[in-house]
Structures are given as C-alpha cells and as structure tokens.
Amino acid sequence: MSLIFSLPAQEELAPDLEVDLGQARFPQYGRTLEDFVPGQVFRHPRGFTIEAGVAKAFAGNFQQANPLYLNAEYARGHGFRTCPVCPQLVFNLVLSMGVQNDSEKAMANLGYYQAQFLRPVYPGDTIRSMTRVKTRRERGEGKPGIVHFQTLGINQCEEVVLQYERKIMVMPRGDSGRPPSAVSGAAPEFPWQESPGIELPVAGTADTSRLTGDGTYLECFRPGDIIAHFNGRTITDEHMAWTCLVGNTHPLHSDRVYSTGLSGAMSGEPIVYGGLVFAWLEGLASRDVSENALWDLGFTEGYHTQPVQSGDTVAALSRVLSVTPGPEGLASAGVMTLQLIGVKNLSAAKALEQYGKDLFLKENDKKDLGKEKIGAKIFEIERRLLVKRRPK
Amino acid sequence: MSLIFSLPAQEELAPDLEVDLGQARFPQYGRTLEDFVPGQVFRHPRGFTIEAGVAKAFAGNFQQANPLYLNAEYARGHGFRTCPVCPQLVFNLVLSMGVQNDSEKAMANLGYYQAQFLRPVYPGDTIRSMTRVKTRRERGEGKPGIVHFQTLGINQCEEVVLQYERKIMVMPRGDSGRPPSAVSGAAPEFPWQESPGIELPVAGTADTSRLTGDGTYLECFRPGDIIAHFNGRTITDEHMAWTCLVGNTHPLHSDRVYSTGLSGAMSGEPIVYGGLVFAWLEGLASRDVSENALWDLGFTEGYHTQPVQSGDTVAALSRVLSVTPGPEGLASAGVMTLQLIGVKNLSAAKALEQYGKDLFLKENDKKDLGKEKIGAKIFEIERRLLVKRRPK
Amino acid sequence: MSLIFSLPAQEELAPDLEVDLGQARFPQYGRTLEDFVPGQVFRHPRGFTIEAGVAKAFAGNFQQANPLYLNAEYARGHGFRTCPVCPQLVFNLVLSMGVQNDSEKAMANLGYYQAQFLRPVYPGDTIRSMTRVKTRRERGEGKPGIVHFQTLGINQCEEVVLQYERKIMVMPRGDSGRPPSAVSGAAPEFPWQESPGIELPVAGTADTSRLTGDGTYLECFRPGDIIAHFNGRTITDEHMAWTCLVGNTHPLHSDRVYSTGLSGAMSGEPIVYGGLVFAWLEGLASRDVSENALWDLGFTEGYHTQPVQSGDTVAALSRVLSVTPGPEGLASAGVMTLQLIGVKNLSAAKALEQYGKDLFLKENDKKDLGKEKIGAKIFEIERRLLVKRRPK
C-alpha cells in the first residue's frame, strides 16, 4: 500500500533562522573504559544485506583463489546453494558494525580469539551484530585499559553465523570526558555457545576437480611445512572505500584530518583497517593452501603487530601446524591448522631469508625470549580450515 | 530467437588503407550558451539499470547510516519492497546522464534547486533522464552566461522518480566555435509538475527499532540545533571511478590532461564531481540526523562553494531549520528541514570554532554583508527529510 | 542436506611446533619457455560467475556508452535477455584465468589475434578458460622465446563464448630453474573452430532510438574517417583492484615489491594490465563509434606498444577501415572494422596534430620504414563491430 502526498515548494529557511551557537552538539561514538560493564550486551545498529555483486567484488579484490567463493557451479557441485559469501567479508562486516559502539574510541585492536564460522552466509542474507562485554581490565588512572568482548553475527533467520572474541585497548574517560552520546541498544539475550555446532552442506557429487590445482589437497600438507607465497599486494587508497563499505566507522582508517591530528606514534596517514589486511593476506595465501578448502572453520591468536598504510605492499607466509581427520560423516576432508604471517615491503621469501624462525614467534613473546620485534612483520594468526582430500 | 552466422577470419586492413588526415573529425559534446533555447527539451542518452550490488556499494562507500539503504529486512519492515536505491545515487545518475548534452562544456555548476524524490527506485529499475531549458541569461560577448534547467529522472514505467532544477555557467560559442557535434534527442513532452505527488509505501509493523540509535528520532531535534559531525572522509582518486560509474562525462573530473590544460583558476588536478561531494557529506551526517529518516524528500539552494580534489578530507555540519508534522495519513513521522554545510581539511568542530555563525551564511550573500568567503567551506544546501517519531 | 558437527576450542599450536626451515617451499606459477609443448591443452583453475553488479561496475567504470551494456530495457528491446556482460569484461576474465598457467612468468604480452565473441554472456553465467599451445619459438640459450596460444572462454552450458590467440615472450628456464610448481589440469579436447558460428538474438521491435545519438549509425561512417575522441581518462591506482577482481595473478600489475625489484627497463611502479587499458580505450571511443553497435564481433593485431602506469592519462583515436553489409538475415546492421589507437598523457587531437599519419602505422613496422616509434602511443588494434543502420 502506498501513501501519496504533496508538499509545498521548498522555501529557503536558513537566512531567517538566527544561528545560535549555544545549540551546538558534538556527538561522539564509541565508549571509553568506564563505559564498558562486564556482562553488558549491545545490539549494534544497521545490519547489512550482502548483495551478490558486493560479495564477488570482495572475493576478487582480496584475491581469493578458492572457487567456492568465485564460481557458483563449483559451489553447487559441493552442495552449497550458490557461492557462499567469503567468511572474511562476514567477519569484516560483523566486526565493523560493532565499531561505532565498541571501538570507535579504541587506541588499538589487541587481538582476535576463538572465531568460528558456524554456517554459510549467502548473497541476499542480512547480517546483524551483537557484542557482550566479557571482562574489563583497568590499569590505573590515565592509563589505557583492556576490554575483552564476545561478538556474534546473526542472519535474518536468527541463526548465529559467526562468533568470536576480541580485545581492545581504550583510554578511561576520567572526570572530564563526555559520556557516550549514542549507544547501541541493550539486548535481553546473547546466544553465545562455548561449543557451537557448525552446519555445512554435505558435498555434492559433481566433478569439479579441474578447477583447482593438484597441490593443495589435504594430502599435500605435513605439519611443519612452511610456504612462502610468491605474490605480494600493494595496498592503495582503495582501503578507505572498503573500510566504509564494510561499515567500519573508526576515523583512523579514512579521515586524514583525524589521523594526522593524533599525537604520538599513531599520528600520520590513515591506517589500513586490520580486517582488510587479514583478508588480503588470506587471499595471497589462498592458491597455495586453501584453494581446496571446503570451509574456513575459524581462527585464534590473531594480532596486528605493525600498522599498514596506503602504498605498503603486503606478503604472506603460511606454516602448517596440524593436519587431522575431518569430523565424523565427512571422510572426504580433514582439518588443517595453519599459522599465517604477514610482512610488508619485502617479499615472503626475502622475509624468510632475513628473519628465519623468528617470523613464526609471536611478537609479544619476544621480549621474554630476549628477542627483537620484527618491524616488517604486520600480522600473525592461527587459522583452522576444512580441506578436501584428493578425489579418488 | 537467435541468428547464427559466420564471418571470414578478420584480415588486417590498416596497412592497405592510406591515412587521410582530411577525413579527421573531432566530435565534442555539451552545448555552448547559444545552443540552449528556452523551452527546448532533451532526451538524454543511455539510461541506467541500477543493479543491487552497485546500489549497495554506493550506500556503503558514501557512508550511509540509514538502514533503509543497507538492510533489506529493515526496509521491508517499513513497507518498502526491499532496500530502495539511495536517493543520492538516483540524483547522481540522473544529473550525470544529462552532462553530455547539458553541461559538458559548462565552466561551473552554479546551484541545485527544488529537487524532489517522488517515489522509491528499486534495484533492477532502469532510469533515464530528460532536461528542459527554463531560461538562458546572456551577459555580453565573450562572457559566460547562465542557463537554468529543469531535469526529470524517469523509471521504466514512465513514472517520474526525481525532478530538480539546476543552473550552470557556460561560455558563448561566438562565431569561431563549433556547433555541438552530438546532441540528445528532442522530446515531445516534459512531465514536470509544480506540485507533484510523492508516493511512498505505508510503513509496515515490524519492530526494527533496535537497528537505529535512539538519538535521531524526530523528537530529538529542535530548530536551531547545530550538529558538528565527528568523522571526516578523505576523498581519494576513487572519485574518478565513481564519476565514470554514474555516467558523468565531464572531463574536468577524470582527465588530468584536460584539467591541467585549462587556463586560470580551474587549472590543476581533476575536480571531484560535486554530486559525489554532496553524497559523502550527507553520508557523514547520516548517523547523527537521518538514521531514522523514512525518506529524503529533496533539497534546494545547493551550492558547491569551493572545489574538492583527491586527497582533501571533507567534513559536515547540520543545522536544524524546521521540524513540522508529517503529511496527513502519516502520523508516525514528521518533516525536518536541515541546512547541510561541508568543509575541507579541518574537522567540523574546528570549523565551527573557527568560523562560527558565518559558516551558515550563504557564500554568495557575504559580499553584500561585508563578509569574507570561507575558503575551507565547500558546500551548502537545505535538505528536507521525512523522519520517524520515536515508536511508542 | 547438511552436516552438523562441533570442534574442540581452537588451541594455540604454533609455540609447540618447532620451526623447521628445511620444510620451506616457494611455490611459483607460470611456465618458462621449455614448459610449453605445442599441442598441450590446459584447463585453467577457478572459473568465475559474473554477477550483475560486477558487470555493471565494469561497464560504468570503463565508460561504455553503448546502452546495450547499461540499460536492461534497451537490451531487451534488441532481443537480448537483459544487458549482456561487456565483451571486454569477458575477455579480461578469460585471459586472466589463464595467467597463472600461461603467462605469470612472461616478460611481455606480444599481441592479440583473431578474437571472436561467439555469443552473449549474461549476468549469472559462469565462465571458465582453456588454453592450447599453438607454437613455441626458441631464440637461443638465455634469450626469451615466443609462445603462441589459443584460448577459449566457455560458459556453464559448455558453449564457447570467446576464442582468441595470443603471443607472449618468456625466458627459458635453463638448467638452474625450477619446473612449474603448480599447473593447470590437462584436458582431452579443445573445441576451437577456425570459422565458428556467432549466435546473437534477433533484434526486437521496441523503439529505443532515443537512447543513442544520431551520429553513430552505420551510415555515419566511411572508410578512412578518423575520429579523435575528446575525453581522456586518468588511470589511478584503481587498476590494481580491477586486476585482482578479473583474476589476473601476474605480480607486475599489483605488487610494487616485485615490480620495483625487476632489473632493466621494466623496473618501476606496477604496470597497468593491458586488458584494462584496452577496455578504457574502447570505452573512451564508444560514444563516437560504438554507441549503436549491436555486438563486438572481435579484434586482431592488438599490441600494447608502451606501458601505462597509475597516474597516466590515456586517450583514444579510431579510424574506419571498412564498412560492409551485415550477415544474411540481419539487414538492419552492417559490419564496421575500426583501427583503435591509444595514446598517453596528451589529448587525442594533440596526438593527431603531433604525429599525423604515423599514429596509424603499426609500431613494429616502423623500423623497416625508417621511422621512429612514438613514445606516447600505447596501443593499436583492429576491431570488428556489428553496427545498426539508422531506423527508418
């Protein structure tokens, strides 16, 4: 049903309304340390319907080599309804929706933990996001504290499609600060599960073997294998457009007036939003390690160890951490855990030559080991994948 | 039905056809002052079918916070068939389709007036554009004159979805100039209405309150309120790709050989197409003022007061000009008129501190008031929105 | 059918697995000269389902003026199901899918020949690619040789949608080189046809004349006509994102560490992937020559004569080589062959003034003619189009 109405022509109003600077407001988003209370649950605004064209543009630009995200015929051959949306895009959207409430005032994203993609998201699905404050650690007056979150991505059928934990570093507001002028809504329940079920289609029977290489089946990997991925990717100003498209509202990523106005080490050109860096690194690695993956199960212990800016070229290395049988009922695949390392402005092979074993140590563990951090290293994470065995 | 035919192999032809420079042509587009006759109506070429993915990429990149343009479930909850296409994209497309005929030779876009979005445009709709010359003002030989247009955007059902007026400044051709070598077709009728009906869906009943903030309902605004929007956006070279995508053919925006070859003040790097600047400013303001809007009714008195180039960071301020009841039959919403001001390379708060009340004076009125223009101010307009009241 | 399973929480594994640098691998893609055997057929990985939004973004960004690729109503009026995917996008995808196997180690793309678009590709179609080695020419130890390929683009119905030939220059591996660590699969058959049928819809009857200009019907062109296209396009860093989106994996185009690490003349900023340069030039020419085309039949003798980098502005010239009647059964259209020339960092008109007839000579023929190559000339090709006659 429609309503039809007419309005009078739009008359100019501004000249006749006196400007009253006393009526000025300066809404800010994000919360300071005191504004987080353990147990609080936030429903994040907006939500996002993922169009097929956006999902494909993401898969392509972030250089996914797994045909599951590129080729609908291939995806259907494996039992999916069509190409599922890249889990990396789902992660970027779910995290970004929460930024306005959770981290728009954060100084740093400290880490990602226990991320699990619980079911496919398809083009046309609508995702929204919720966050619960798990813990808050204060470190004294005037010092930034640490907030530990749990976040859920939920589809239009109220099914959880992603859950993960994240820690951020954020300053206390102190007496002089403003309370948050806009917040997410409170929610009654938060369907986080410690050991959630993962729901995947049972593979179809189509022969799709010709669309992936022969060197990336489960059998091709042994624990300890290190793969230096050949291609790097120069990240351009495009990162700002992607940051906006996935809905990340932190001005550090796309507002040069803000980023250059910061004091200290963070001052300078906008920093590339970390979720995009992760997506590029995963894409660069994909033709060597995940071309034959059936699913990105999740990741943990993820740290952005150095910032990336427009003009930097990123490259990736993977190390196989374990290869184990798949879940019951899925004999055709196994679970592989990989360490993914990102570097900038040198090739992966060169990084391996230059830094050797130390590339694979967590940067935060180095101080205790009496080792220097690696300035060229930008990212470290452990990923868990479901990978096909070679078809017989 | 199909036709199947074969062609002989394509033989190389160029070496055997003598080059005759006398057969060279140099087609140009756009019209000079003399080429506009009041009353003339032009049907613009091409048209554009708006794909869902393009509409979503626009909404995201231009930082729309209103879930109406992001979340299909939310849109359906408000009676829309799915997410309508952002009115800003509709405006950009309709204007751009007319550039080849109307303004590809224009020196400046002077202003937008009486824009009204008459009904939703949905993904899959095809929009075309028509223009009528309203008036032409000559200002003497060798001096640029002013042409006043009326433009319509029309969907595939022959319904007008947008009408607006625009003024441009354009040089006369004089005796030595070339007549336009390609023009839009003439059209028999021009369905402009002085007081057109606006057709909107009647709101549904779904609870969608959790997807928008609580601070942007109609009740939250009083005439005189000034809102300095926190985030700015650094505009990158991406603007050229968007200019091309919306079909704007003026070379000033995406041809550096052309832009640097101009003489005078306009010479330099390509200028960001104004429609995109407007879209970004509206997006930056959206989470503070239009997150709960049901419709962009239109705008008037819009002026680009300084150019924006790649690398500039834009920021926005809004001032509430009026808040009135909605049209009959729509008790759940009201009409809000806002002044939207854009600045570059400083934050909105800083601009307010620095320029105070003068930010809200029209730049063209300043001379008469004995005031200086503000070099950092890039845009001013009055916008009219239909905004939800807080659900009970 | 779905499978539901749970996994134990993801434990951190890296610290407990000793790093063994002896297990490092350095997979490389592409083949060296010896790795090509005439007659070999490769099935390329991945494939690509072309979403409507991606097809439209391509048509828009690359400045297509032919409404066939922009306006679904227009396309249906001409008998197409909806807007067909731009042949330029199909070409870019089909070529790019083969890069990982065919040319990721190539030093240069030498030329395109005998390209034919055999039927429309529609949004939702999935394209894959196959290549056959036609010939391999060695030129002595340590010298690059030339490989001549035939490539097919095939849709999900196993119909060939595109076939073309290409030559590349590639170094021999010599004794010390690594054999290719990942290859495309071998294929039993290769459905290339010397004189293939072209299948097009029979035109509908809708009046769509108002959406194209009057100056681009078949009758408007005579052999010998030269058209200097007015607008140029500044190519920005966006080229890297497009290169990734179309699936081209050669690091020369999007990895600055790789491109600046090359020795010799190629060392420097990433080079724009040639298929994109071609697409932009065709787009720049389109409103003057192909706005009324019904089909891009194909092209031959295509050469990228100088590299293009981010920041360069490209412009185009066309020369009519022949105008002949259309195939039997299609009296409403004719076949036009055009020479398309690209230049950089000067306008088309200026290039014509400066270089005159020499612009239209093939660069490789110039040495024999005692002429200098033109540094500003970037591209040359002969294109064959099916162009509408003016409706009566």
Image (cartoon, coloured by chain):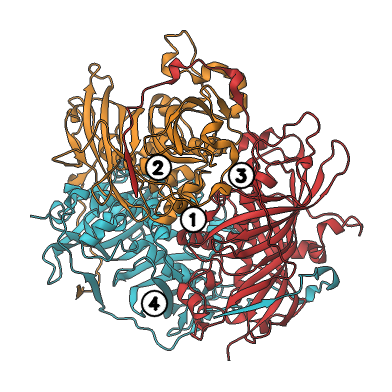
Chain colours: A orange, B cyan, C red
Residue occupying the point 26% across, 27% down: A148
Q: Is residue B84 left or right of residue B142?
A: left
- Say what amino acid the circle numbered 2 marks: Pro
- Say what amino acid the circle numbered 4 marks: Gln
Q: Image quadrant for the N terminus of chain A?
A: bottom left
Query: x%, y% of residue C121?
Result: 55, 66
* Sequence order check, earlier mark of 2 and 1: 1
Residue occupying the point 75% across, 41% down: C35
- Say what amino acid the circle numbered 1 marks: Glu
Establish whether labels 2 and 1 are both on one chain.
Answer: yes
Image quadrant assignment for residue B202: bottom left
Establish whether labels 4 and 1 are both on one chain.
Answer: no
Establish whether labels 1 and 3 are both on one chain.
Answer: no
Mark 4: give few (<14), some (14-19) or many (20+) Cα within 10 Å.
some
Q: Is residue C1 above or below residue A276?
A: below
Question: What is the distance, in whole Å, between disc 2 and disc 1 at their CAs?
Answer: 19 Å
Q: Which residue is mark 4?
A: B156
Name the chain under label 2: A
Q: Image quadrant for the C terminus of chain A?
A: top right
Q: Which residue is mark 1?
A: A73
The residue most toward the bottom is C392
